[in-house]
Amino acid sequence: MLPEDSVLFSRFTERLTEHGMDNSTISFFRTIIYDYYHEKGRDQPWRHTPDPYHIYISEIMLQQTQVERVLGKYEEFITAFPDFSALANAPLEDVLRVWQGMGYNRRAKALKEGAKRVVNEFNGSLPDDEDILCTFSGIGKATACSIAAFAFNKPVVFIETNIRRVFIHFFFHDQEAIQDSDILPLVEKTLDTSNPRQWYYALMDYGSMMKKQIQNPNRRSASYTRQSRFVGSDRQIRGLVLKKLLETGEMDENELIAMINEHRERVEKIIHQMKHEGFIQQKKNTLRIS
């Protein structure tokens, strides 16, 4: 089904109105989602493996990043760091160099820190418990559950942007300021517990298609916010600092600040923060990647 197929959508809303969330309504909803998935589902390399390491890498990469950009970096990253041990033992500088172009460099550092925990605390095996995964750097509830679903096929319940879009469209089509707490019970009730991995892939693909076909239903979510502007942001300056240090190996702090076309005090503050976070180390007045 495409959202513009008003006949099928009308049939679903009529069924929902008349019968509520009974088994026939749930079955009809799953059929709509699965029919689209089986016909036009996306082919992505991390879907061809249940390897927890590969899923871990892809799910962190997919945070706040378009799939197309991840597709261009995923294989390169896996080749450079083929398992948890390789990533845990790699210098941060090497990890950040391969990560370049993905943005949100904290995620690369978090990946490495997570790999260290897997090696040191879990005997090299990623835990399948979403509550434990939530204690990993850079992993929140939604990412922890997505890893549990895709790596271990666990019937967990979670929401991400594409899933939210689908449920708002089908179940809240005439409402505003919809809370995730109202959506989650529906996600749980409609979950295909026999194959949660495939079901969540199908939901995400349907939601991704909807973004291109209709006005974004997520604008009616209470949690909807527009992404902040990148140009001129602290995030852009952080990226420039790392890029210069990766290019040169090390730089005099005053020279580095002079190369970044921003107020000195602002750049100094950002560099200080990056040192505190463990991205940068300083010896006298010389900076380098930690």
Image (cartoon, helix red, strand yellow):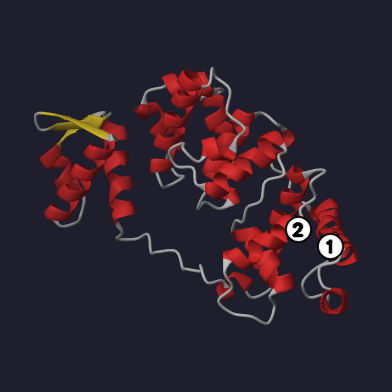
Point out residue 191 in the picture as x, y percentages from the top left corner.
76, 53
Q: Residue at x 88, y 64 (%)?
A: 28
Q: Residue tagged by mark 1?
A: 26
Point out residue 108 in the picture as x, y percentages from the top left corner.
43, 37
- The answer to whether residue 15 is above or below residue 81 is below
> Residue 93: which disc?
none
Pointer 1 and pointer 2: residues touching (CB < 8 Å)? Answer: yes
Point out residue 144 in the picture as x, y percentages from the top left corner.
56, 42
Is 73 left, or right, of 272 in this rendering? right
Q: Quadrant of residue 207?
A: bottom right
Q: How many marks?
A: 2
Q: Quadrant of residue 40?
A: bottom right
The residue nearer to you, when weighing 171 against 205, is 171
Q: Residue tagged by mark 2?
A: 189
Q: Quadrant of the C terminus?
A: top left
- The answer to whether residue 257 is above or below residue 190 is above
* Amino acid type assigned to the residue bearing label 1 in the image: Ile
Q: Secondary structure at mark 2?
A: helix
Of pointers 1 and 2, the one earlier in the residue sequence = 1
The residue nearer to you, when weighing 242 against 6, is 6
